[in-house]
Amino acid sequence: MVASSMATLSATVLSSSSCNSTRAVNIRRFFASSSANFPNSSRLVSRKSSQIKAATLQEKEEKVDVEDSFRVKTTSYIVEEPTDDDNSSIKEPGMVENWVIRFEQSINVLLTDSVIKVLDLFYSDRQYARFFVLETIARVPYFAFISVLHMYESFGWWRRADYLKVHFAESWNELHHLLIMEELGGNAFWFDRFLAQHIAIFYYFMTAFMYALSPRMAYHLSECVERHAYSTYDKFLKLNGEELKKLPAVQVAIDYYMNEDMYLFDEFQTSRTPNSRRPKIENLYDVFLNVRDDEGEHCKTMKACQTHGNLRSPHSNAGRPQDVECAVPTADCEGFLDCFKKSLADRK
């Protein structure tokens, strides 16, 4: 009976692809009725059917070879070394700095693991709601980075136009991920919205404080979150790929990946040259495939940012002379305390 109902609902979804609103409703009905391949959020399912569904998902997960969320292999990125003579060589960290880096990363992994346990507790069988919460959280660091960078500019300490451009482009990309999950019904329940928004508020102030003290630590924390997002979407695609290919793409994904101006889409992918990636969206599988690949690009950008002064906008023209009249001296400092200390030293 379940298989026949699933086939009937799939045919209904495919036959109504001409209407965007009807398409979205049918997608939600399809996933609401599926008890074998897709997570179910209905409270009307009996305990016995829930156990059967959990056993089925567990059996499928054992067949999928997905690495640990903090060991996900992404394509290697090329780090462009600074062109200025003063920054031509990168110093190897000393013993104390290596210890500090390991300490920072240990804290970040602990924080990320804690959030993952919360998500596993509430969303083990509701993937769209999990994706909504994850995307609400994932875009917060870029807001925090931009806020602190504007503070540095206001004090006249540090101006990094490339950082502002790239981080805004990253937040723009994550916004559309969030819109996709909302169109799929991930924000349908009040509790999911409440949890996501309150975690986001705490995460914003924590990241802003961390970024002011140690940008390297803040960027690594964001890298951990993006790695988990990549792993989550990768597992979801491998478990449900065939079903997703039968479903139409949501309109917001088509508008973002195919119809919009792609300048900001290229901007956050700092390891790529502009116009080198142009997604094609034909079904729901393509949507999640590109969302997953976006998270991989975020991860590579965050890793590049952990080397101070290493980030470059893909659209920046290194050969163009800087406008001296409008230029603000760039301080070579990291974090609020370092910038404040060096600003006092310059006045002496």
Image (tube, rainbow, N blue to C red):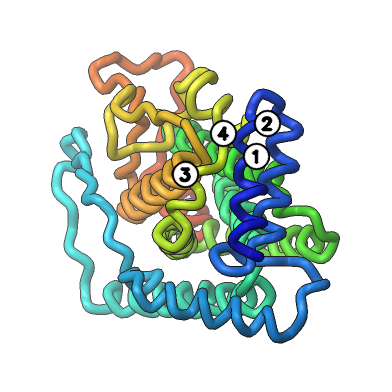
* Quadrant containing the N terminus in the rendered view: bottom right
Residue count near mark 2 (Cα–Cα under 10 Å), binned few <14, some 14–19, many ≥20 = some
Q: CA distance from mark 4 to mark 3?
A: 15 Å
Which amino acid, by three-letter code, is at mark 3? Answer: Lys
Determine which of the numbered discs, if any, sits on residue 16 in the image: 2
Q: CA distance from mark 1 to mark 4?
A: 17 Å
Give the left or right position of residue 302, taking residue 210 as reference: left
Residue count near mark 3 (Cα–Cα under 10 Å), binned few <14, some 14–19, many ≥20 = some
Residue carrying label 4 = 253
Secondary structure of the residue carrying numbered label 1: helix
Residue carrying label 3 = 245
Determine which of the numbered discs, if any, sits on residue 13 in the image: 1
Q: Position of residue 331 (x, y in %)?
A: 41, 42
Secondary structure of the residue carrying numbered label 4: helix
* Mark 1 or mark 4, whichever is nearer to me: 1
Q: CA distance from mark 1 to mark 2?
A: 5 Å
Q: Tell whether label 2 touches label 3 (CB within 8 Å).
A: no
Q: Position of residue 148 (x, y in %)?
A: 58, 47
Which amino acid, by three-letter code, is at mark 1? Answer: Val
Q: CA distance from mark 2 to mark 4?
A: 18 Å
Q: Tell whether label 2 touches label 1 (CB within 8 Å).
A: yes
Q: Position of residue 270 (x, y in %)?
A: 34, 37
Label 4 or label 3, whichever comes before in sequence order:
3
Q: 265 above or below 68? A: above
Q: Tell whether label 4 touches label 2 (CB within 8 Å).
A: no
Q: 5 above or below 104? A: above
Quadrant in which residue 63 is drawn: bottom left
Give the left or right position of residue 309, taking residue 46 as reference: left
